[in-house]
Amino acid sequence: MTDHLDYGATEDRTLPAVTYALYLLAFATGFTAIIGVIVAYANQGAAGPQMRSHYTFLIRTFWIGLVWCLIAGMTLGVGIPLSFILIGIPLLILAKVMFGLGAVWYGLRCIVGVIYLAQEEPYPRPHSLII
């Protein structure tokens, strides 16, 4: 699980793969992504250019996903009390759609990152908002 660089050095792909696995495992546990982002922050500085692009991508995926979940949660929080007078029902539907789209976005980003990692390539656009 190493990448071969032009000058003979190798980059270890194990920890980025573990971080992607922790991110995907968060669908079942809900908290392993926090461990994953800690691993990404801890190893980003010592990584080579290829793996640094994956760590940057992983860190941005975590924070963008967290902000998206907070926005969807606030929408849900406003919609619940307003739903008693029927005004908040569209907000509840919107929050559900936001959580669903956020989960699809998060999952696709992780899967695309794993594909680039398996092909021994750096992530081409680690600073992008979309996949």
Image (spheres, rainbow, N blue to C red):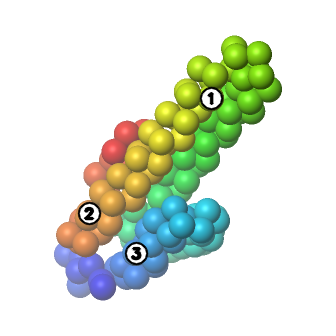
- Residue 66 vs residue 80, the one in the foreground: 80
**Residue 71 x/y as whole percent:** 64, 34
Identify residue for label 3.
17
Up/down of 39 relative to 131, above or below = below
Residue 98 visible within the image: yes
Residue at position x 41%, y 45% in the image: 105
Q: Secondary structure at mark 3?
A: helix
Identify residue for label 1.
92
- Residue 109 vs residue 4, the one in the foreground: 109
Up/down of 127 relative to 114, above or below = above
Residue at position x 72%, y 23% in the image: 83
Front position among marks 2 and 1: 1
Identify residue for label 2.
116
Q: Secondary structure at mark 2?
A: helix
Q: Secondary structure at mark 1?
A: helix
Cα–Cα gap, marks 3 and 2: 11 Å
Q: Is residue 51 left or right of residue 98?
A: left
Q: Is residue 6 left or right of residue 71?
A: left
- Residue 9 vs residue 116, the one in the foreground: 116
Earlier in the chain: of badge 2 and badge 1, it is 1
* Residue kind at label 2, given as amino acid type: Tyr
